[in-house]
Amino acid sequence: MNVFPLVWSLYLSFCSYTDTSHRTAKWLGTANYDKLLGDPDIWKNFIVTAQFTLLSVGAQLLVGFGMALLLNRTFRAKGIITTLILLPMMLSPVVVGMFWKFLLDANWGLVNWLLQSVFHVQDRAHPMLWLSDPHNAMWSLVLVDTWMWSPFVMLISLAGLNAVPPHLYEAAEVDRASAWFKFRYITLPMVSPLVMIALLFRTIDCFKIFDLVYVLTGGGPGDATKTVSFSLYQKAFDQHNTGYSCALAYMILLIIIGLANLFIKYLAKVRGEGIPDATTLSQTLAERTQHLPLLGWLCASPARLLVLLLLGAFWRQIPGVLASVLGHWQIVLGIALAAVAIRVMMQLPTIVRNWLAYGAIAVATVAYLLPIYMIVATSFKPATQIFSMPPKFVPTHIAVDREKPSTGYDFGLTLKNYDALLYKRVGNRPDAPVERYADFPMQVGNSLFIGGLSTFLAVALGTMAAYAFARFNIKGKGDLLFFILSTRMLPAIAVVIPIYLMFQSLHLLDTRIGLVILYTVFNLSFSTYLLKGFFDDIPHEYDDAALLDGYSRLRTFWKISLPQALTGIATTAVFCFITAWNEFAFAQVLSGSPPLTAPPSIIGHTGSGGTEWGQIAAGAVIFLIPAALFTFVMRKHLLRGVTFGAIKK
Amino acid sequence: MATVQVKQLLKKFDQNIAINNTSLDIDDGMFMVFLGPSGCGKTTTLRCIAGLEIPDGGQILIDGEDVTKLPPSARDIAMVFQQYAIYPHMTVAENLAFPLRAVKTPASVIEERVMEAARKLHIERLLPRKPGKLSGGEMQRVAIGRAIVRRPKVFLMDEPLSNLDAKLRTEMRAEIKRLQADLKATTIYVTHDQLEALSMADKIAIMYGGFLQQVGTPSDVYDRPANLFVAGFIGSPAMNFVPCQLQPGRTELLLEGGVSMPVQPDARSRFADVPTGTPLMLGVRPEDIALRRDSAPDFVDVEVYIVEPLGSENIVDVRLAGNAFKARTLPTFTAKIGDTLYMRIDQSRAHLFDTGTTLALT
């Protein structure tokens, strides 16, 4: 199930084929690839993707690492604030994208209102066109991606900061080192390997970005934000140019696999035994410098050569990308400012520093909670108050019929949005009797069913596989793990084409069972890998003792290992469920209209009056509740889950 | 170099008292060892002197100057940590240079001092290496080297040898002592290993449960333990203890189990001030017990429980009316389990303790 679609699409990539006709595929040889490499539009898409990746990953590094530094001190409510900031990355990108689209609206968005009326940096007559100006659209994407994923970098950086043994700082303190000296010569070098891991993760994710583009900008305006994944989607499912898009998918796959391989190699080095302690870290660093003779480094792995070849192919584009990124003087300035800020902060006495940090933490918390609060508030607002300026923050009363827009910050509470989402009423009039349930409850039910069943299957199968991986010496174990991880890192859009074709011929399109199978397979690799880590943590002496006491292997597994791995299994299940629950690309492509699950449905609420933001907000709130709940329950295990079990705490 | 004074030091962690009213004087150039079991407050005392912990009461003076409120960096001290605290991402040379670079020393001075320290510790060839590949002993040398490049007023060492294997520990012990003698540096050394303390210290401060038990030279604490704790903690095998009473007239010692021992003539003056009729504890070191095969005056008969041959000596474990005694004998002295032997306690070197106050009475 993991391999077959890939082989098929490899074949198709050499053919002329479109999924709407019933003609069999015609062999074309390398024609698709020839066309691809000569297509200036594709090159442009790659440049856009590279731009986005560089900007976004850079911003996430600054923001994420900065927040980690701020949070790396003890204060009250630290746990709850950290968890709140971590919330966005557990949410579905399409839903996040959708409500940012709302917040970024030029005329009635919260962001512009803040800039105009609170900070007075924008002229009301010329609002910033966040999404419809070609130059700004990219920045909007970067902004939303950064908001969503900086917490990820923060989480990993925090783990790194915690892993620095405190006696190193004590030794430096006795040796009269200043705060800046300690930061520069101890903190930075010791944390950087883990931060590198976070950045590699983010690079791979940014490279395949699709969901956010789909909802925020639709690739526009013009081609300004058309990333390769999005372009691929259009070619495959709008233009039905299947063979050609398979070829493009393969190019993306190669790049991702190259990146993933680099990443896994690096991970294996840093990992050592779980969290890197001082010695393994130093070994890693020592090994890294030994590789410095470039040739040895290159020959060490074919994957590196591959990446280099790709770089070679893109050679002519690199100056362009760099120029366009560095051309944004704001970035250079931002990095310089951040560095100066840290340097200056270090000179201040500890008390002043702490108070500044608390201030910054407060600002970050507001930045993270305000958008979420706005969406919750919007879901309870009557239609007349959703778009009125200034934005309404405070619910003061129960809304009446035909509520007038207020001039203050208050709004009336109403459940109309939820009602419209749940029930279909006669003639679509809000006060008419209920005709039947609307589609949405069904879709949420489907999401629950599909997510639940696929999670159960993936975890059940994964547990057994993981036990085998952890306890037996299986040939090619390492390769298999690599394979598992790299399939997980593939962009959904690139593998969805052959799966679509497969489902078409198996009549699984738009069926629940189809998605269950798909998500099970998709999650199985992840659950196996994560669970293996948990089983590895249980000393095998327990098993040995049970086996010596006359238990069979099966009973040992059932009575000894399984009970000890329960926390791990629960953690894995939650992450599998959230993945399936949030999944958008497959669900969008593989289900019809109305869509089968909730994510594609939430973004599609357009009625007679344009986009029904009230209903979208209500849908988003209902949809976000499970993810938010699980984030709180699982906060201790978040790190392990989001890094595929790569980093343990 | 400098003197260190600790005055009425008090340190609490939450409600637990880690150090209780401890006062100590450490002379210029002295090798002072803090000795005690884990949790006794020795490391906390050291960390207070270093400035890594802020005391809840009392004062710390270095060279007469009150440094109680100063940060570690203002105290001109160097510290060797139990976990070495070698920066893993720097070479040995960079590690040695770290404390000098932290205070912006000219490069030429750094170079010279690093080389000097490396020569003293025989680690010149390790200078370009990263710590990841060093052995425990080498790491330890680097950690000490990082302290001596500083030329600080006081060296603090927190169990520096506890992570090394037994053989290396014996070697390093001698080397650190020699280094200290060469540098004539005031040194405070924390350990739980009494052998380290006895072999290295000019003076030993023995701590237990947050209280200072005794301060003295190695022979002071070995030969004249101030209380039951010190007596039991110092020496291996440990001192033998038997509950007893001094009979009125001070001519007879009644051991638990009903055995009566006449007080030997040369011990009479020792026991002169010991109260009679109260519960006491008799303490005898294994080397102060004589064993022989045939009976003799002053000797009582005992049964052999077990024999532990140690090569250079034999430890013979005997029973006297239910009381266990370990005796140190020549390696040529052999006995079998169940044999009957004759034992004499050298009372002139034995100790009597008050069971209630645990203080030494002799």
Image (tube, coloured by chain):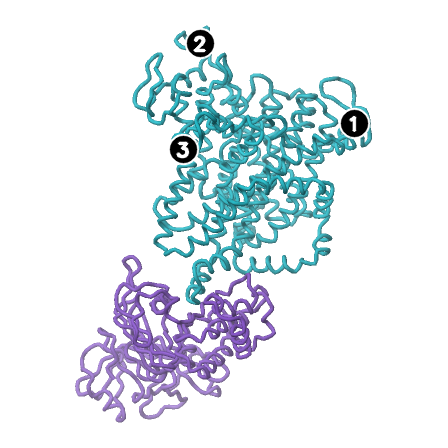
At x 31%, y 87%, the residue is B349
Amino acid identity at mark 3: His
- Direction from residue B280 to residue B100 in the image, left or right: right
Q: Is residue A615 above or below residue A165?
A: above
The tint chain B carries is purple
Please state which of the two labelled residues, at mark 3 or mark 1, is closer to the viewer: 3
Q: Residues within 10 Å of mark 1 (few under 14, many from 20)?
A: many
How far across and how far down the image is residue B125, in percent? 61, 74
Image check: A548 left or right of B204?
right
User: Which of the two residues, A465 or A268, is positioned nearer the viewer here?
Assistant: A268
Residue at mark 3: chain: A
Name the residue rendered at 35%, 85% in the picture: B219
Q: Is residue A625 in view from this perspective?
A: no
Q: Nearer the viewer, residue A120 or A251?
A: A120
Pointer 1: what residue?
A15
Amino acid type of the residue tagged 1 in the rendering:
Cys
Instruction: Look at 30% across and 76% down and name the residue there.
Output: B64
- Chain letter of the residue carrying label 2: A
Q: Which quadrant would residue A415 be assigned to in this image?
A: top left
For the residue labelled by badge 2, is the local secondary structure a helix, a strand or a loop? Answer: strand
Chain ID, cyan in image? A
Is disc 3 placed on a helix, strand or loop? loop
